[in-house]
Image (cartoon, helix red, strand yellow):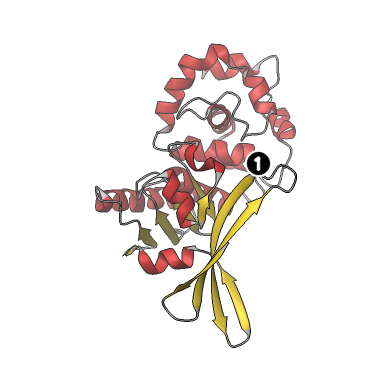
Amino acid sequence: MEVIPWIPQKQFIVKISFISSSKSLLKAIVNVIAKCDNDTVKISSYLNFIEQTWQRKEKEEITYYISRNRLKNVDKDINEQIEFNKKMSQYFDVPRIPLTYYSASTVEEFFNMQGFQYHPMMYADSTGGVVYKNNVLSANNSEYYPHEISHLYIRNAVPGINQFFDEGLATYLGGSGTQSYEQLKAKLKKEINRIDIWKVCQSNIFDKSYWTHDFPASYVVASLVCEYGIKKYGKTDFFKLLRDVRETKIIFQNLGLNQENIQEQLLQQ
């Protein structure tokens, strides 16, 4: 769509649109960085632009890039995150993981910092984030995001974990969005009569059929299953059940949970 010169020299912002050929539907507009070096052009993530324009802070093992729109509680959030990182290190008995944290003030800005000028999910949720390698990208207007930090430790300590239990453990340890696990569990207690727990457990963890505003029902059900497993087998043995097992149904068999007993077992919990 457009190539925009950007200082420092020989760098450009390249604006690309993705349009469905069958319906002429705009799917996304995304910016990437292009750096020219003699006859070579190297394309890189728009996060490189963010790193040079957002506020940078370092605290112990965490490097922050913080939106200029973030004004309140920055240092408080950073200190809480450092403490949570220590807590996860102790819980999983591994060294503290150094990470880079990109802190956006809104979901729209969260997509913007990844280069998206338009994406259909920019206006679908009020919170969110993503973790890849040792990078955490947050849309929560906060420098404290225990759910995504938990993912870093889970994938380190439980290699090959499948998505259902990855999200369940992260919610059990760090809540989801801006809510703690206990807050989410209290909401589940009120919603339980409209939820078929077994059906949720057999569905894709990212299926939002049961979700309501700020209540990711499938995550909360998965976290309740994780709490059940940890209480029944202990943390170490439960993690062994999860390592390198991609099929959720096999883990449920090992946990002794099935369509007939799961509602009762988890309701007792």
Q: In the image shown, does 256 or 214 lie closer to the viewer?
A: 214
Residue 226, horizontal then vertical, whole percent:
56, 32
Report whether 123 appears left or right of 244: left
Vertical comparison of 44 with 239: above or below? below
The quarter in which the N terminus is drawn is bottom right
Amino acid at circle 1 = Leu
Report whether 199 appears left or right of 187: right
Residue 132, horizontal then vertical, whole percent:
55, 55
Q: Which residue is mark 1?
A: 242
| Crowd band around label 1 with a 10 angstrom C-alpha radius: few (<14), some (14–19), many (20+) | many
The quarter of the picture where residue 207 lies is top right
Residue 59 seen by the camera: no
**Which residue appears at 50% of the width and 56% of the height?**
114
Q: Secondary structure at mark 1?
A: helix
**Which residue appears at 51% of the width and 41% of the height?**
170
Residue 136, horizontal then vertical, whole percent:
47, 54
Vertical comparison of 243 with 203: above or below? below
Residue 82, horizontal then vertical, whole percent:
34, 53
**Which residue appears at 42% of the width and 57% of the height?**
101
